[in-house]
Image (cartoon, coloured by chain):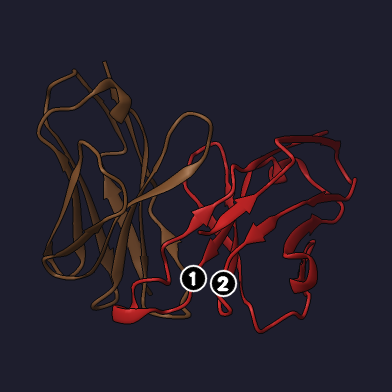
Chain colours: A red, B brown
Amino acid sequence: AQKVTQAQTEISVVEKEDVTLDCVYETRDTTYYLFWYKQPPSGELVFLIRRNSFDEQNEISGRYSWNFQKSTSSFNFTITASQVVDSAVYFCALSGPRGAGGTSYGKLTFGQGTILTVHP
Amino acid sequence: SQTIHQWPATLVQPVGSPLSLECTVEGTSNPNLYWYRQAAGRGLQLLFYSVGIGQISSEVPQNLSASRPQDRQFILSSKKLLLSDSGFYLCAWNGGSGNTIYFGEGSWLTVV
């Protein structure tokens, strides 16, 4: 069974601080996909990144960066120089590979989410 | 470009009443479609998924059902709502293996 753990329930920082959101996953699949989504107060889930299990390169997109380490089953998310607009709930999610009938991919297992509050 | 919409955005329904939430994807064909629910406590749980018209798979036993009458339409229904059905319902789609999974705006359901 798959499992995603986001140990940090809530994080509070002051604007311009760097913040790292932790994500640890468990899976028996050798091929899998990891995601991060942002959920602002409006409720919709905003896609941030998708990473497959064969690509361990870290990725940077503006103030966002992701550190994927298969050895520790972690996919951590760092926001540099945080801003008030970054305040939201952030979810890490895990999907299996394309299985028989192509249905495993897309069946996401979510972590419980981390509430990030950035104060001005 | 592809877009996904779901409605209604907000719904308040009495216990025992029926439910119909609709999700439509535009700009793509033969998408995989999903219904997720986010109950209090923030966790998201997969309820149903569909790989084609009329093909529905349920992930958890519940008071809800899903249907896919058209290629890009996914409907979540209930004949009689329970208080425990309250939550935030999200429709999602992807174009196949390796593609990004996108979510709709969500529907807030309160059963009173």
- For residue A33, the mark is 2
Above or below, comparing residue A55 to residue A95 in the picture: below
Q: Which secondary structure lies at badge 1? A: loop
Disc 1 target residue:
A96
Query: Residue, x 47% and y 47% (percent of image)?
Result: A44
Between residues A11 and A34, which one lies in front from this camera angle?
A34
| Nearer to us in this view, A29 or B64 | A29
| Residue lying at 40% horizontally and 71% vertically, measured from the top left | A104
What subunit carries mark 1? A
Q: Residues within 10 Å of mark 1 (few under 14, many from 20)?
A: many
| Residue pictured at 55% horizontal, 62% vertical | A94
Residue A16 x, y percent position in the rendering: 89, 46
Outermost residue, bottom side: A54
Q: Earlier in the sequence, mark 1 or mark 2?
A: 2
Asked if residue A100 shows in the view, the reply is yes
Give the image location of residue B83, x and y in percent: 28, 21
Q: Is residue A28 left or right of residue B34?
A: right
Q: Amino acid at mark 1?
A: Gly
Task: Determine whether B86 is above or below A14 in the image.
Answer: above
Residue B111 in percent (x, y) is at 27, 22
Query: What secondary structure is found at the residue carrying circle 2?
Result: strand
Task: Judge from the rendering whether residue A18 lies leftward or rightward of residue B5; answer left or right.
Answer: right
Quarter of the image where one finds residue A39: top right
The answer to whether marks 1 and 2 mark residues whose Cβ atoms lie closer than 8 Å is yes
Q: Nearer the viewer, mark 1 or mark 2?
A: 1
